[in-house]
């Protein structure tokens, strides 16, 4: 663990929960941004803090933003709906890349780092100006994101075809052949690919494949 007065870098979920886990019993305003469901919930220690949030859900505001590709997996989509219904969380979806972040009561920020040898580092920040800047970025992302129920309805049809389309794209199958494989017209297939790319927040088919792999969809 590295630390100064207002920034602490911890390594792995155990160190993170040891440092800030107690705050889940007192937080009244929790904001979270994540590209997938694994960043903040990766082992059994998180269950204690999830339970703490659940017990206090009527006393706090919980807002979460996720990247849209999460909804392409039916299990993840159900998990998001469960978090909304169980915790009363407000959940919105974005196609933009997210800086994976937790903000507690506008006083503390946790920024997730990259995975290194299976372990993620986290920066725990209390420096007021930095916290204020991160909060401003979150609020901008929140305003531009779409409510979970609205977005999930949009991608329900895409979700059914996503695994097959992603498989065909990963194998470099030509559009005409892929369309015949799925019993679709070429225009319909290309529209489904475009919708899938939009759901993944991807600007190219290659990027769509990369993001699909990040989410475990292929």
Image: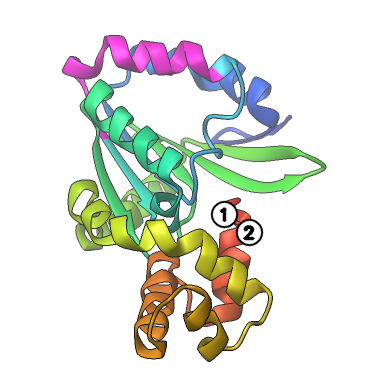
Q: Is residue 118 among the parts visible in the rendering?
A: yes
| Label ID, residue 217 | 1
- SS for tag 2? helix
Residue 157 x/y as whole percent: 31, 60
Question: Does the stretch in magenta take in 168?
Answer: no
For residue 104, which quarter of the picture? top left
- SS for tag 1? loop
Residue 60 x/y as whole percent: 21, 22
Say left or right for 108 vs 170: left
Q: Which region is colored magenta? A: 46-62
Mark 2 Cα-neighbour bin, 10 Å: few <14, some 14–19, many ≥20: few
Residue depicted at x 69% and y 30% = 12
* Quarter of the image that includes the C terminus: bottom right
**Colour mapping used in the image:** rainbow
Front residue of 198 and 66: 198
Residue 3 x/y as whole percent: 67, 33
Magenta segment main secondary structure: helix
For residue 15, which quarter of the picture? top right
Q: Do the residues labelled 2 and 1 touch (CB within 8 Å)?
A: yes
């Amino acid at each position: 663990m590295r630390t100064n007065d207002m920034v602490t870098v911890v390594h792995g979920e155990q160190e993170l929960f040891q440092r800030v886990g107690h705050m889940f019993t007192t937080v009244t305003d929790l904001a979270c941004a994540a590209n997938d469901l694994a960043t903040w919930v990766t082992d059994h220690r998180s269950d204690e803090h999830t339970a703490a949030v659940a017990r206090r859900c009527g006393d706090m505001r919980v807002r979460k933003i996720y990247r849209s590709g999460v909804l392409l997996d039916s299990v993840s989509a159900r998990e998001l709906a469960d978090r909304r219904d169980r915790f009363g969380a407000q959940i919105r979806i974005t196609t933009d890349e997210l800086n994976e972040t937790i903000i507690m009561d506008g006083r503390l920020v946790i920024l997730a780092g990259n995975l290194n040898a299976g372990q993620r580092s986290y920066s725990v920040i209390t420096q007021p100006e930095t916290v204020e800047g991160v909060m401003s970025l979150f609020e901008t992302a929140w305003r531009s994101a779409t409510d979970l129920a609205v977005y999930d309805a949009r991608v329900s049809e895409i979700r059914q075809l996503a695994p097959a389309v992603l498989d065909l794209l990963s194998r470099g199958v030509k559009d005409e052949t892929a369309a015949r494989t799925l019993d679709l017209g070429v225009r319909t297939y290309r529209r489904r690919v475009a919708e899938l790319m939009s759901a993944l927040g991807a600007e190219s088919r290659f990027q769509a494949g990369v993001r699909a792999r990040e989410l475990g969809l292929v």
